Amino acid sequence: MLEVRELRAGYGPVEILRGVDLDVAKGEVVALLGANGAGKTTLNRTLSGLLRPRAGSIRFAGEPIGGLSAEAVLARGLVHVPEGRRIFANLTVRENLLLGAYRRGRARRRANLERVLALFPRLAERLGQPAGTLSGGEQQMLAIGRGLMAEPSLLVLDEPSLGLAPMIVRQVLELAAGLARDGLAVLLVEQNVVQALAVARRAYVLEQGRIAAAGPAAELLADDRLRRLYLGL
Amino acid sequence: MVDPSIVAASALHGLATGAVYALVALGLSLVYGVLHIVNFAHGSLLMLALYGVYFLHERLGLDPYLALPVLLPVAGLAGYALHRWVIAPAGGARDENVLLVTLGLALVLENLALVAFRSDTRTIETAYSFSMVALGPALLPLPKLVALLGSLVATLVLWAIVQKTDLGRAIRAVAREREAARLVGIDTRHAFALAFAIGTASSAVAACLLLPSYYVSPQVGHGFVLIAFTIVVLGGMGSFWGAFWGGLLIGVVESLGGLFLGESLGQIGIFAIFIAVLLFRPTGLLGRPL
Ligand SMILES: Nc1ncnc2c1ncn2[C@@H]1O[C@H](COP(=O)(O)OP(=O)(O)O)[C@@H](O)[C@H]1O
Ligand SMILES: [Mg+2]
């Protein structure tokens, strides 16, 4: 579904991603781990077209998407739920969700809204409320719901559990696993290493813009050297 | 003691002027809410629109109110183009630069107007310029009544666009979260330029409503920008209804101030209110963003 090869990107003179290779297949959760500042968010932003790659290739559903606009990448079904949720706090919950399907027709929007609300009953109760008045966990659900409104085939979740209570963290990660079971591909950036590896099939560890380790989640968890070096366990 | 009917008439006058102020302020406020800059060129664009109405009337005999369907799309397109291809590229990514670009633009437009139209103050005369309408005990010139009602309608339309349409939602989304807006597929450059276009178009509406009871000169925008800025701060930066009520309030205060203190002192009331608000309620009367 997603094939990233030798990807390089950065800001101004600074190169942050220095040759990244990564794959995500349909129906799997892939965890992307790494210390703060490793370049995880930069990778996500490059995948979703917010940042132009400098070199290397990004193929999605068989087509090259490197260098396309964010709008074009979205239209192909790669949806990025950004770090820090970035909901539209001044808009209502309903408006936030509808904007998720901004490029879709009315009928599709309605259908998607029903589907997403069935997944998040809490949001259904709060449709008319300004999104900024939601709790942190609800805001994260809204951010994911807004992403799902765009009908993704690959969902990129950047630290969805940031700042949430442990019980909510579990819910969010289980949600990611459930979406993958339904056929979505999920790239999951996480700081909660153990919990992320529990729901992921495979994982990558990013270190200073390079993939330092990769493999099945269970193997990474079992490898003492990796645990110490990269996972902080 | 002043005759109550004169006070009532003065208050009505003020309300009518205030409704137009509110419209101009709403354009400024919308652009502020989305682009986070005070658009100094706002008054110059109003000035150009007033000249547009003036020449359409003088050269083509077009009634100022009927000029609206001509001027509205022209102003909208001009506003769009101005932001997309002049202000945004010249300002780059930094808001401060954009601010300076609008200031420079104001100077350029005003001086071009001085060269092209000279500094004369111009007015137009229509068949209804001096018609009066009795509203209870007070008499109001017909153009003032049209300005009042027209501004109210335009304000409601503006509100509906911002609150109820896809475009309005996109504009509000971009105002708050530029990057997340791109992630849902909003073309942010397009949305910014559209917000600017709507701001410019509101000035064009104001120009059509104003000219029958007002004048135009190359500097006419100054007073409006100052008052509109006062209103935007008074109402709470970026607050829609704040700007609306602020506009009405300023119009009435200015008119009654003129009545009791004389023309030249009338505006003191405005700035007294402005300073009081900044001292006691710096977020404005209805301080809640867009
Ligand atoms: N907009 C930006 N401009 C310049 N440098 C940036 C920008 N965003 C992030 N960086 C830098 O890029 C590096 C990687 O950041 P990021 O991708 O956010 O890491 P992570 O998500 O893994 O914590 C950091 O050193 C950060 O300071
Ligand atoms: Mg990050």
Image: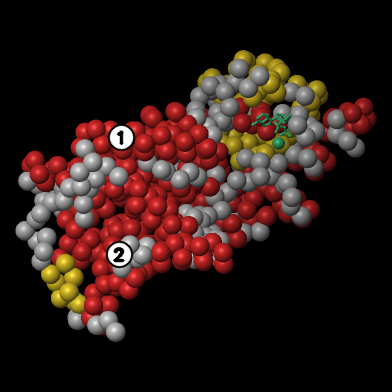
Q: Secondary structure at mark 1?
A: helix
What scheme was used to colour the molecule?
secondary structure
In terms of depth relative to the viewer, which is nearer, B13 or B269? B269
* Mark number, residue B263: 2
Instruction: Please provide percent x and percent y for residue B174.
Output: 49, 44
Q: Establish if B85 lies above or below A163.
A: above
- Residue found 47% across the figure and 49% down from its top: B33
- Residue found 76% across the figure and 29% down from its top: A38
Q: Establish if B262 lies above or below A5.
A: below
Q: Residues within 10 Å of mark 2 (few under 14, many from 20)?
A: few
For the residues labelled 2 and 1, the Cα–Cα distance comes to: 28 Å
Report the quarter where the N terminus of chain B lies.
Answer: bottom left
* Mark number, residue B278: none
**Label 1 sits on what residue type?**
Asn
From where the camera sits, is residue B93 visible?
yes
**Label 2 sits on what residue type?**
Glu
- Residue found 34% across the figure and 33% down from its top: B108
Rendering quarter of residue B42: top left
Is B61 positioned to the left or the right of A223 in the image? left
Instruction: Please provide percent x and percent y for residue B230.
Output: 43, 57
Instruction: Please provide percent x and percent y for residue B110.
Output: 31, 38
Q: Which residue is mark 1?
A: B111
